[in-house]
Image: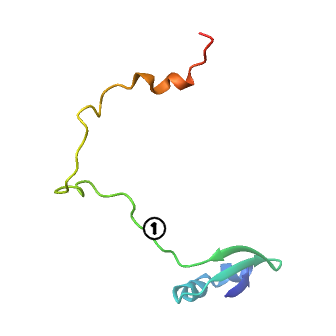
Amino acid sequence: MHVVNIHEAKTHLSRLLEIVERGEEVVIARAGQPVARLAAYHPPRRRIAPPGSMKGLDWQMADDFDAPVDELFSCLQDGSR
């Protein structure tokens, strides 16, 4: 891990990015105190299934899936009315 001050980070950003691309981390410090960490970017894994991804799979939806739920908000009502 490399520790550099802010001035050096601004001056040598390209060199620091090369270090990060090699898999190392760089800590940027102000007056010797760590302020930020420069690390490689890893895109997040896609967690949302794309449209149509369940095509061909065996699944069922209840016939009354869209029926109104009258008591849904009854727990939020106070008894003073």
Left of 41 or right of it: where is 37? Answer: right
> Which of the pair 49/42 is nearer the observer?
49
Spot occupied by residue 26 in the image (x, y as percentages of width and height): 65, 83
The quadrant in which residue 8 appears is bottom right
Spot occupied by residue 5 in the image (x, y as percentages of width and height): 75, 81
Residue 65 seen by the camera: yes
Query: Coloured how?
Result: rainbow
What's under tag 1, amino acid-wise? Pro
The quadrant in which residue 30 appears is bottom right
Spot occupied by residue 2 in the image (x, y as percentages of width and height): 68, 88
Left of 1 or right of it: where is 54? Answer: left
Question: Is 35 rendered above or below residue 53?
Answer: below
Question: Is 10 rendered above or below residue 56?
Answer: below
For the point 62% across and 83% down, which residue is it?
25
Question: Is 73 rendered above or below residue 29?
Answer: above
Residue 6 seen by the camera: no
> Is the N terminus in the top left, top right, bottom left or bottom right quadrant?
bottom right
> Which of the pair 36/57 is nearer the observer?
57
Tag count: 1
SS assignment at label 1: loop
Q: Residue furthest left?
A: 56
> Which of the pair 61/16 is nearer the observer?
61
For the point 82% across and 80% down, which residue is it?
32
Identify residue for label 1.
44
> Which of the pair 66/33 is nearer the observer?
66
- Within-10-Å neighbours for mark 1: few <14, some 14–19, many 20+: few
Left of 70 or right of it: where is 66? Answer: left
> Is the C terminus in the top left, top right, bottom left or bottom right quadrant?
top right
Q: Residue furthest top?
A: 81
Spot occupied by residue 49 in the image (x, y as percentages of width and height): 32, 58
